[in-house]
Structures are given as structure tokens and as C-alpha cells.
Amino acid sequence: MCAVGAFKDDTPAHAEDDPLIRSQAQYMALLEESLSAAQAAKRLRVDVSRVRKRLRERSLFGVKHGGTWRLPLLQFKRPLVLPGLARALKALPADLSPMDVVDWFVLPEADLQLEGDEAPLSPREWLMSGRPVDVVVAVARDLTRA
């Protein structure tokens, strides 16, 4: 399971057998473990209107639920956002579902491996490590062409 607010360990046991239940549980966990726009603003030390503007610009990732924004933790690296996050988000197809965006950020990507790496990194790990943002942007753009 992911340790960035995307998955919950107490998913019902029968969910393993039912992809719909599992995806619904993961989506609800994503919402529960995300920040509100006000919480994100406090973390980023900006006004909540700035957070909403960045959500509209796709330089922050959010899920609209019940009339409010929820911002998944996976995009934050204390106390700010991941380096290169805005560029990566803008390169992703705009029509991806929230869970597809989460999966893309947290699952290993074959194109994100340098010589000497034991295994491919996820886009989140790549950005957190300070590696070149252009590589992640290229991987995100490849999704548009797929």
C-alpha cells in the first residue's frame, strides 16, 4: 500500500475479489487522507484563493468532492509541493480520472530508471529525488499519445 495518502490498509477483505469495491475504497481513502483547500493553503503559507487558482491552472492536483476541493498528499514534500509538480501535472492528459493520476504518480515507471538504479522509480520518487523534471514531463506526455 502507498504511504502518501492514496490507499488505506483497512479495505474490506472481500474487496480483493471485487475490483469495483476495491477502487471505490481506494477513492474514498484518497478523499479522506487528502487536504482541504484551506489546509493546503496553510501548509503552503498562501491564501486559499491562491490554492484554488493553482487547482484551476493544474499546477496542483485536486479532486472536487461534495462541492469542496481535496488535495492528495502525494504531491506534497514538506513543507511545499514536489519539485516540478506543476510541469508534470500540465503534461498529463486533462481527462485522466483522479485514481489514474494517483496511480501514475506512485507506481514505478519503466522509463524512470537510470544506470545504477536497482529498479524503476515512480514519477513521485523521481521528482522527490531532484532528478530532471523534463524526463517525468516526457513520460506524462507519452500518456497523451497512447
Image (cartoon, rainbow, N blue to C red):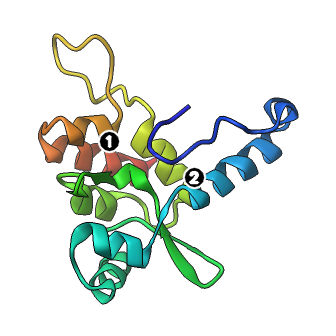
Sequence-first tag of 2 and 1: 2
Q: Secondary structure at mark 1?
A: helix
Quadrant assignment, res 28? bottom right
Above or below residue 44? Residue 131 is above
The answer to whether residue 97 shows anywhere in this view is no
Please provide percent x and percent y for residue 66.
66, 80
The image quadrant that residue 4 belongs to is top left
- Above or below, comparing residue 19 to residue 97 in the picture: above
Percent of width and height locating residue 133 = 16, 46
Q: Residue at x 52, y 60 (%)?
A: 96
Inspect the image, locate mark 1, and give the three-letter code of the amino acid beneath it: Arg
Foreground: 30 or 20?
30
Foreground pick, 10 / 84: 10
Above/below status of 135 relative to 73: above
Q: Secondary structure at mark 2?
A: helix
Q: Which residue is mark 2?
A: 99
Relative placement, left or right, of 55 versus 136 is right
**Residue 124 seen by the camera:** yes
Mark 1 = which residue?
124
